[in-house]
Image (spheres, helix red, strand yellow):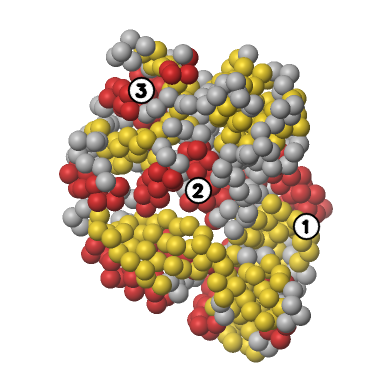
């Protein structure tokens, strides 16, 4: 049977452990992509990904492999995003597979992301093939890596394949293990259609291209399909496979991985994790694990100059077409004017959106410091979700505030354990839960901590304390009561709402002081002295002053005749520089992120 020759797999790896390189070798080894066509790192397609060397969006690829048993197998490799912001997407990609390759860099050992994703794979009942990678490196520590795999996940030296994406060592063994250890997909081809959406992308010409795993039944051009979560119906115009280019086929049937095009205009209609079924003969229960994606952090987004608002709106609408996790609504800030409140999965997601706006749309924008969503129970009995610190209710109206908490896993060499526990419990409001050994000299530390605390300046400190060796991963566990306060910032005695932030009461003074100091460094000098004040509960709790510029410097800056055209150019440059004039003060973009730059 054709289906017995299919293998659907994912690759689990921490960032930089060599996933893309390994896939490239597999493509080369199986002749999927001719050598001369082979671009470095075929799977990473977005510019930003290529530049930063991180994989964000999963792009599947089908590989044909003639195994030692003489049969030709079809292996679908579904790539997974390598960042905690996208863990829901990772879990849905894994759900589309029967097995996973667990790739560990032998010079780095098991890291937090590897560990977390392995658990996601085990939860999805995947067969796991442990691969110790980069064994060609002189500093590869194979023995210790295996000891960590054994302690943390239970694999022994005999279970592992020793490989190198660089030399090609171990690639044949990996291919054989995929064929022999990972089960073929099961599923009933005669049952009504049941397919899992594990990704969706928007194409200018074809609309939404759904990446799907067919679980039961089959789908053919002309079929009417229905989305389980919304009930929306569409007619299929094309189905096909990933080579990794899209290649149309007649049908996709149970066990197969491929794409479906059905005149869908918006990625919101093809939600990751949703079940596709037949409109005529729908299933009654969906596939498990579907969740609506909710943004975890929000930030204000404003045009570099007010007149670019429309341009920004168009750009963000375009981005949204291809990014179901992005949410936005118009916002009016007294200081910055018209803009948007934008919801992101996390800080990496935010960074990607900002970079795309600047590069693909050439729009300079001002992004304010991100914040988590607070749940505020009011005295009048209502509960509101606060996504904008400027809109945080007055103390007198509040009954209780709750903030999101995470379980935090940190894998680190044992020698840094003490300093890390100290840092997280005393500076980051974390609660230490437990420690587990991993190999001879590493440990896994578990904490509960507020999401807000691990968002800012956490990763860098973690790396600094551990000399780069610790890695982290977290999972949201829900909301817990918290005693937080809103701090307002005044620049030159005017409230700049876009600089407001929410902070735990225990850190109110320290954070306020650091923010005003930071703003003092980030806002340039003007002809006049500029006081910067932080206010909470009606009192000024911190202040710092920017001294006035001396006169002779001014003469040089503002001399000369400026034509209309020059003025315009100047204005545009200003927009590009991302400066905004508030009151009489020019505030640069970096100042709006001052909060992120302090501990
Ligand atoms: P993300 O997409 O960021 O998760 O990274 P990745 O896991 O895809 O890693 P990638 O394949 O980009 O490799 C990261 C770095 O390690 C690159 O500089 C590779 O050239 C290098 N590398 C990958 N595999 C090997 C290997 O087997 N041996 C050696 N020496 N270097 C390798």
* Gap between marks 1 and 2 measured at Cα: 28 Å
In what element is the residue under mark 3? helix
Q: Please state if 107 lies on the left or on the right of 474 as rendered.
A: left
User: How many circles with numbers are drawn on the protein?
Assistant: 3
Pick whichever of labels 1 and 2 is earlier in the sequence.
2
Earlier-in-chain disc, 3 versus 2: 2
Mark 1 touches mark 2? (CB < 8 Å): no
Q: Is residue 192 above or below residue 473?
A: above
Q: Which residue is mark 3?
A: 179
Residue 154 image point, x, y percent: 26, 46
Residue depicted at x 25% and y 26%? 169
Residue for badge 2: 87
Tell me where residue 422 appears, x and y as whole percent: 34, 74
The Cα atoms of the two marked residues, 3 and 1, are separated by 52 Å
Evaluate if marks 3 and 2 touch, with contact meaning CB atoms under 8 Å apart.
Answer: no
Mark 3 or mark 1, whichever is nearer to me: 3
581 and 56: which is toward the camera = 56
**Residue that label 1 marks:** 330
N-terminal of the pair, mark 3 or mark 1, is 3
Q: Mark 3 packing: few (<14 Cα in 10 Å), some, or many (20+)?
A: many
Label 2: how many residues lie within 10 Å, few (<14), some (14-19) or many (20+)? Answer: many
Q: Residue at 74% of width from left, 77% of height from top?
A: 381
In this orientation, does residue 53 appear? yes
- In which quarter of the view is residue 46 placed? top right
Instruction: Count residues near mark 1 (Cα–Cα under 10 Å), then give few for <14, some for 14-19, many for 20+.
Output: some
Residue 359, percent from left and from top: 62, 42
Residue displayed at 74% across by 74% down: 382
What's the distance in space between the residues labelled 3 and 2, CA to CA?
Answer: 27 Å
Identify the residue at horizontal 34%, vertical 50% (top origin).
Answer: 111
């Amino acid at each position: 049977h054709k289906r017995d020759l299919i293998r659907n797999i994912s690759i689990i790896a921490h960032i930089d452990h060599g996933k893309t390189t390994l896939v490239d070798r597999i493509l080369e080894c199986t002749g999927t992509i001719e050598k001369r066509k082979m671009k470095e790192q075929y799977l990473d397609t977005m510019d930003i990904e290529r530049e930063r060397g991180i994989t964000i969006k999963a792009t599947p690829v089908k590989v044909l492999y003639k195994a030692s048993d003489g049969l030709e197998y079809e292996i679908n490799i579904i790539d997974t995003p390598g960042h905690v912001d996208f863990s829901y997407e990772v879990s849905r990609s894994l759900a589309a597979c029967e097995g996973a390759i667990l790739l560990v860099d032998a010079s780095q050992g098991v890291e937090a992301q590897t560990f977390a994703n392995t658990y996601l794979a085990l939860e999805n009942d995947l067969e796991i093939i442990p691969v110790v990678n980069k064994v060609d490196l002189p500093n590869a520590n194979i023995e210790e890596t295996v000891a960590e795999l054994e302690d943390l996940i239970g694999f022994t030296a005999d279970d592992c394949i020793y490989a190198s994406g660089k030399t090609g060592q171990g690639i044949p063994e990996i291919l054989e293990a995929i064929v022999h250890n990972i089960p073929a997909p099961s599923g009933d081809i005669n049952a009504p259609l049941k397919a899992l959406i594990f990704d969706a992308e928007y194409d200018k010409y074809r609309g939404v291209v759904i990446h799907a795993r067919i679980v039961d039944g089959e789908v053919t051009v002309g079929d009417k399909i229905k989305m389980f979560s919304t009930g929306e119906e569409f007619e299929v115009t094309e189905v096909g496979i990933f080579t990794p280019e899209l290649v149309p086929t007649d049908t996709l049937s149970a066990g197969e991985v491929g794409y479906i095009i059905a005149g869908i205009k918006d990625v919101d209609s093809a939600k990751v994790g949703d079940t596709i079924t037949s409109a005529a003969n729908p299933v009654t229960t969906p596939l498990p694990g579907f969740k609506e994606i909710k943004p975890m952090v929000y930030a204000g987004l404003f045009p570099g100059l007010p007149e670019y608002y429309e341009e920004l709106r168009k750009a963000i609408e375009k981005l949204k077409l291809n990014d179901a996790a992005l949410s936005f609504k118009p916002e009016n800030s007294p200081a910055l004017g018209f803009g948007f409140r934008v919801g992101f999965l996390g800080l990496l997601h935010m960074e990607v959106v900002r970079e795309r706006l600047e590069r693909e749309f050439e729009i300079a924008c001002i992004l304010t410091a991100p914040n988590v969503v607070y749940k505020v129970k009011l005295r009048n009995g209502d509960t509101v979700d606060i996504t904008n610190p400027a809109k945080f209710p007055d103390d007198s109206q509040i009954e209780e505030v709750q903030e999101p908490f995470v379980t935090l896993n940190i894998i680190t060499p044992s020698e840094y354990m003490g300093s890390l526990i100290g840092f997280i419990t005393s500076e980051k409001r974390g609660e230490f839960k437990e420690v587990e050994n991993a190999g001879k000299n590493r440990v896994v530390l578990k904490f509960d901590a507020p999401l807000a605390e691990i968002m800012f300046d956490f990763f860098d400190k973690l790396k600094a304390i551990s000399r780069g060796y610790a890695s982290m991963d977290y999972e949201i566990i829900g909301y817990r009561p918290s005693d937080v306060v809103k701090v307002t910032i005044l620049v030159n005695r005017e409230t700049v709402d876009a600089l407001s932030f929410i902070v735990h009461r225990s850190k109110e003074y320290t954070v306020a002081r650091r923010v005003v100091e930071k703003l003092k460094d980030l806002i340039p000098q003007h002809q006049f002295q500029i006081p910067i004040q932080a206010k909470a509960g009606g009192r000024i709790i911190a202040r710092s002053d920017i001294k006035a510029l001396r006169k002779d410097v001014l003469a040089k800056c503002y001399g000369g005749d400026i034509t209309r055209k020059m003025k315009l150019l100047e204005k545009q440059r200003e927009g590009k520089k991302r400066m905004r004039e508030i009151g009489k003060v020019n505030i640069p973009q970096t100042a709006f992120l001052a909060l992120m730059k302090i501990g």
